Amino acid sequence: MSRKEIIQQLEFFRDIGITSLSMDAGSPVVAAAVMTSPQTAPASEGLAAIREDIGDCQRCKLAPTRTHIVFGSGNPNAELVFVGEAPGGDEDEQGLPFVGRAGQLLTKIIDTSVDPGNITRADVYICNILKCRPPNNRNPEPDEVAACNSFLKRQLAAIRPKVVCCLGTFAAQNLLQSAVPISQLRGRFHDIDGIRVIATFHPAYLLRSPEKKREVWEDMKLIGTELRRLRG
């Protein structure tokens, strides 16, 4: 890990209110600094088949305005999947999820919070409710969600993660089929189709409200604890 990356991680700890860290071998900073990211597993045939089915999708009104379909990326055998709302401008341009400022913050959160030294962004899978960017980043509309919903369910079925983390209000309310605010949904697990599901604030929201980073840190630690429990 470079000096710049270590400084960024220390700044993240500072932002969420952590002012001291143990420097033994098990501390998050030391573990993150010495770890080597594992290679991402080979592409899953299940996910490849789903992407092939999507094709050059024309199933909803977002098709004419998109640049790229943003299917998802990461480890196809991931224990942990993050589900966001929809691609933004950077994601639409590159065809990959969470690559803009919010994505950079998400990477930092994953690398330093869930299980430092053992889980990095390369170990998880990341996707969205929608596969195409809504114009001007507006909220997804019901017909658009309906057009994409089966593909998201198939992605989760192909990966079979132990835990799914919903990022933000829209993803949480959609997956959990709830109108409860994200502030009430976060901080605890829900069971959906045999998968443990937790919700937390979206990284884009944290860029506007950095005081909420501490709560996201707490949610990530819950995920790490739950993953260890599920592994037995």
Image (cartoon, rainbow, N blue to C red):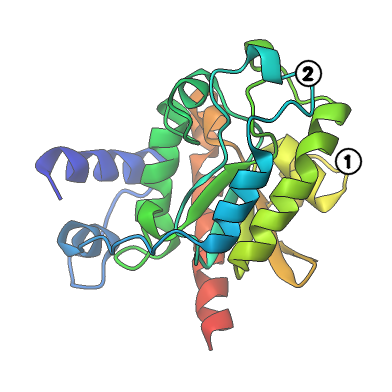
In the rendered image, residue 203, in percent from the top left (x then y), is placed at 52, 35
Q: Is residue 146 left or right of residue 69?
A: right
The picture quadrant where one finds residue 94 is: top left
**What residue does disc 1 label?**
179
Work out whether residue 123 or residue 221 is closer to the camera in this orientation and state it: 123
The image shows residue 222, relative to residue 226, as above or below, that is above
Please tell me how crowded label 1 is: few (under 14), some (14-19), or many (20+) other residues with Cα within 10 Å: few
The image shows residue 159, relative to residue 215, as above or below, that is below
> Does dot 2 land on a helix, a strand or a loop?
loop
- Residue visible at 34% across and 63% down in the picture: 116
Q: CA distance from mark 1 to mark 2?
A: 25 Å
The amino acid marked with disc number 1 is Ala
In the rendered image, residue 103, in percent from the top left (x then y), is placed at 44, 35
- Residue visible at 49% across and 41% down in the picture: 213
Q: Is residue 184 visible?
A: no
Work out whether residue 225 or residue 122 is closer to the camera in this orientation and state it: 122
Q: Is residue 9 visible?
A: yes
Q: Is residue 101 left or right of residue 27?
A: right
Mark 1 or 2, nearer chain start:
2
Work out whether residue 153 or residue 193 is closer to the camera in this orientation and state it: 153
